[in-house]
Image (tube, rainbow, N blue to C red):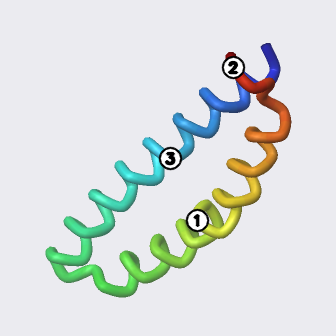
C-alpha cells in the first residue's frame, strides 16, 4: 500500500503545482511580475524532484502482470 499512497501524494503534488502555475500566469498578466517570478522559482523545486520521485516509485511499485 505504501507505493500506492506515495503515488497518490505525488499526483496531488503535481496537480497543486499545475494550479499554482495557472494562478502565477494570471498574477503575471495582471502586473505582479516579481511575485510570479518568485513563485516560479519555488515551483522549480517540484520540477527538480519529480524525476527522483518517479524513479523511486518505479522501484517501490511491483510490476503488474
Q: Are marks 1 and 2 in contact (CB under 8 Å)?
A: no
At x 57%, y 70%, the residue is: 42
36 on left or right of 65: left
Q: Secondary structure at mark 2?
A: loop
Location of residue 23 in the rendering, given as x and y in whole percent from the top left corner: 29, 58
Q: Secondary structure at mark 1?
A: helix
Locate the N terminus and report the quarter of the image it occupies.
top right
Q: As rendered, which of 49 and 63 lies closer to the eye?
A: 63
Locate the C terminus and report the quarter of the image it occupies.
top right
Residue identifier under label 1 = 47
At x 84%, y 33%, the residue is: 60
Residue identifier under label 2 = 64
Please give the label number shown on residue 23.
none
State the CA–CA distance, disc 1 to disc 3.
9 Å
Residue farthest toward the front in the current orientation of the protein: 65
Q: Earlier in the sequence, mark 2 or mark 3?
A: 3
At x 75%, y 26%, the residue is: 63
Image vertical order of residue 53 relative to residue 64, above or below: below
Q: Residues within 10 Å of mark 1 (few under 14, many from 20)?
A: few
Please tell me whether mark 2 or mark 3 is closer to you in this view. Answer: 2
Please give the label number shown on residue 14.
3
7 on left or right of 23: right
Amino acid at each position: 500500500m505504501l507505493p500506492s499512497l506515495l503515488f497518490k501524494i505525488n499526483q496531488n503534488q503535481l496537480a497543486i503545482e499545475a494550479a499554482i502555475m495557472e494562478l502565477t500566469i494570471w498574477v503575471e498578466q495582471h502586473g505582479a511580475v516579481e511575485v510570479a517570478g518568485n513563485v516560479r522559482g519555488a515551483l522549480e523545486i517540484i520540477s527538480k524532484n519529480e524525476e527522483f520521485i518517479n524513479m523511486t516509485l518505479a522501484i517501490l511499485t511491483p510490476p503488474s502482470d
